[in-house]
Image (tube, grey):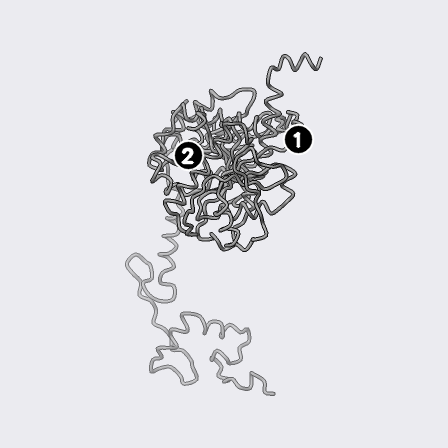
Amino acid sequence: MSDAKENTPNGPNTPEGPNKDGNARRRSRGGRNRNRSRGKKEGETQDGANAQSKPAKASENGTKEEGSGGNKTSRGRNRNNRNKRREGKDVKASPVGEEIQTEFEQQNDLYDIDFSSTSTTTAYPETVLEKPVIGITCGDLNGIGMEVIITMLEDTRLAELCTPVVFASSKLASYHRNAINKRDFQFRLCDTLEDIKEGANNLVLSWDDNVEINLGIPTDVSGAYALKSIDAAIEGLKGGKIHALLTAPINKHNIATSVEGFSGHTDYLANEFGNDVLMILTSDQLKVAAVTGHVPVSKVAEGITEASVSKAIQLLAQSLKRDFGIVKPRIAVLGLNPHAGEMGTIGSEEQEIIRPVIEKAQHKDAVIKGPFPADGFFGQGFESKFDAVLGMYHDQVLVPFKSLAMGTGTNFTSGLEIVRTSPDHGTAMHLAGKGKADATSMRNALYTAIDVYHKRKGYDEMTNDPLKKQKEKS
């Protein structure tokens, strides 16, 4: 093997030639030597010796204009000039106004969340368990309503918890059983509510018409007969024949074409029973509600008033106590505008409406905090510190809710004199008749209806004539 030194030229001044201290090689690779070697003049030797450079011409001020050190003096002077300390003026902040100072103090207090001394355990004794009769509406005839009802009721263990009663027709039930290949499942057909039987999957015949079914397509008749199912259930509720209502999903549009002003189950039931109501979405992870329900976004701000926000807080607090057994509920209230208005820069509703209502709503039976900026609130996980979150409009709270609990949550209508629940999904027309619809949310809605029925009954018994109760204990 050859040595690398044997394959290199041995000129005395070449970069590769022998050098006692090795400096010649390093200098030859430097910028100045390399540039000179590229432009050899006639006086240079063939072995690579460099011709001597002409001395640089001195300028009148004594600095060099050209040559190896031509810019050193100039650079040094500039560097010294840069290092000279520039004199600056003292800048003092203006005094913070009392209003701004108060705002920041309120914000600091808002995030001082310590509920260690707050108990949320149920203090109301549950009643002796009895099987409530749960009315179930069929939903839009062309959607997944009957499919998830059938799938849910296949579990025979549910008969130990309640007596289910579906309001529909035998033809509709048969059509959906055949579509999803569940022909072995059978309903017990009843002409009236007097015919229902405990331990059976009852179906009360609510119409005799042979209605055309077009799975996956919401039609005028599929909406009209969905409403017939709702009306039949309402009649049973008012007559005391059923104890709670579970509604399958409907298409609001195809009902609104025949019923002026129809906007959904919640408002329809509120009008029928004459109650102030609030829609609550509930799951094991989270409970949310909105001041304005199914209204266009362009009209949301109009609906944010002192009266509407106050009523929503009142309904939510009362429902958490009566329907969910929370003794002292903790409620977070969100702002309407981005960043909760940024101290009035992006909107004034927080300062003028929401915060004053929250201050007035403070009482010993509930802990209410806000208004929180919605994005940071959910982004930092503050929802886990509260029993419920009250937003100002539909998507503000339903988007995070469905991101966290879609398919397992329940839609609950608080404020109604009767118990009403619904799954957290829609008609899912694209899945109708394919046997792919998930019945989890429908099943959870049934469980919620049963639980709320028992908790509400226990609360009412506990709080009815409290003086009498105290005398009985003593």
**Mark 1 → mark 2, Cα distance in angstroms:** 34 Å
Q: Is residue 407 above or below residue 114?
A: below
Q: Is residue 15 visible?
A: yes
Looking at the rendered structure, the secondary structure element under dot 1 is loop
Q: Is residue 357 above or below residue 171?
A: above
Q: Residues within 10 Å of mark 2 (few under 14, many from 20)?
A: some
Looking at the rendered structure, the secondary structure element under dot 2 is loop
Total numbered badges shown on the rendered structure: 2
Residue at 58%, 36% (x, y): give it: 196
For this rendering, which residue is in front, 279 or 136? 136
For this rendering, which residue is in front, 174 or 41? 174
Disc 1 marks a residue whose amino acid type is: Leu
User: Residue lying furthest right in this view?
Assistant: 474
Q: Which residue is mark 2?
A: 293
Q: Is residue 437 left or right of residue 256?
A: right
Percent coordinates x, y for residue 411 in the rendering: 50, 37
Q: Which mark is residue 195?
A: none
Q: Is residue 143 left or right of residue 324?
A: left
Q: Earlier in the sequence, mark 1 or mark 2?
A: 1
For this rendering, which residue is in front, 375 or 175? 175
Q: Which residue is mark 1?
A: 129
Residue at 60%, 15% (x, y): give it: 465
Disc 2 marks a residue whose amino acid type is: Gly
Q: Is residue 417 above or below residue 19?
A: above
Residue at 41%, 85% (x, y): give it: 46
